[in-house]
Image (cartoon, rainbow, N blue to C red):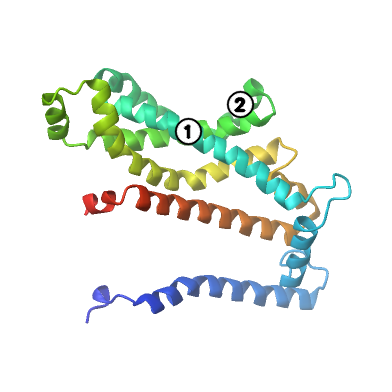
Amino acid sequence: MRLINRHPDRTNRALLMLLPFALLLLAYFMGSSSRLAENPNDKLLPSATQMVAAVDRMAFTEDKRTGAYLFWQDSAASLKRLGMGLGIAAVVGLCLGIAAGTLPLLGAPLSPLLTVLSMVPPLAILPILFIVFGLGELAKVMLIVIGITPVLARDLEQQARQIPAELLIKAQTLGANTWTLILRVVLPQLMPRLLIALRLVLGSAWLFLIAAEAIASTDGLGYRIFLVRRYLAMDVILPYVAWITLLAWSMDFALRKLAQRAFPWYEGAKA
């Protein structure tokens, strides 16, 4: 049997999924043990014991100055900003995508504008956002919105343009006006794609959030990472990075399951 036609069963698939992560952990802890054996004070590759102690200190021990549990406080602050940014971007991107992909009179000016805006590096305008919106929460949320909205809108615009013209013509023949077409034909077709597009931009959204928190914030996961880096506290940084990765994966998983449950017909339609 050719290799291209060989498919792993469920058990082997699970083992193959875990294999690269196990190899990465093995390589890390072997390197950590080697460095700590040469220099017990080495901070570059902390041991598992050191990282567990750091997590216990950050997540389960009250901060002496504020009385808060810093790990959970940072997580709540970052998730709040990320949730607001993704929510606003989803609504705005959906509206712009429908307008540009469905209404020719609006698509003519919007489509090239969205193309240009999607090419602007969001981190390059971060200083402008801080000048315009100040150093508070609004600037951080706006960076996420500005960074991912054009991408979402362009993706949804293309999806709207791929809706068969026969559907639109039949709906108009049955008496549907423009709003009815948008609400009853276009919107249901775009909603599953919106969830998929949100999954695709999650990584960028986290990047913009961490960058904004690192520059101007007093809490948040990005703020904490860049605060402790001056002390070379890798025992704190690595667990924080792992936690961010887990949160991002969990959000991606939740969006995928939501799309499957809410729009089970979408995968079948694509097939």
Q: Position of residue 225 (x, y in %)?
A: 71, 50
Closest to the observer: 26 or 164?
Answer: 164
Label annotation for residue 129:
2
Query: What's the CA distance linking mark 1 and mark 2?
Result: 16 Å
Q: The C terminus is located in which quarter?
A: bottom left
Instruction: Give the answer, above or below, for where 133 lies relative to 144.
Output: above
Q: Position of residue 173 (x, y in %)?
A: 11, 25
The residue furthest right is: 64
Q: Position of residue 184 (x, y in %)?
A: 26, 31
Q: Quadrant of residue 80?
A: top right
Q: Secondary structure at mark 2?
A: helix
The residue furthest top is: 105
CA neighbours of label 2 inside 10 A, class few (<14), some (14 to 19), many (20+) = many
Q: Secondary structure at mark 1?
A: helix
Q: Quadrant of residue 165?
A: top left
Label annotation for residue 146:
none
Label annotation for residue 89:
1
Closest to the observer: 6 or 53?
Answer: 53
At horizontal 46% and vertical 44% (from top left) the residue drawn is 201
Total number of numbered labels?
2
Closest to the observer: 51 or 28?
Answer: 51
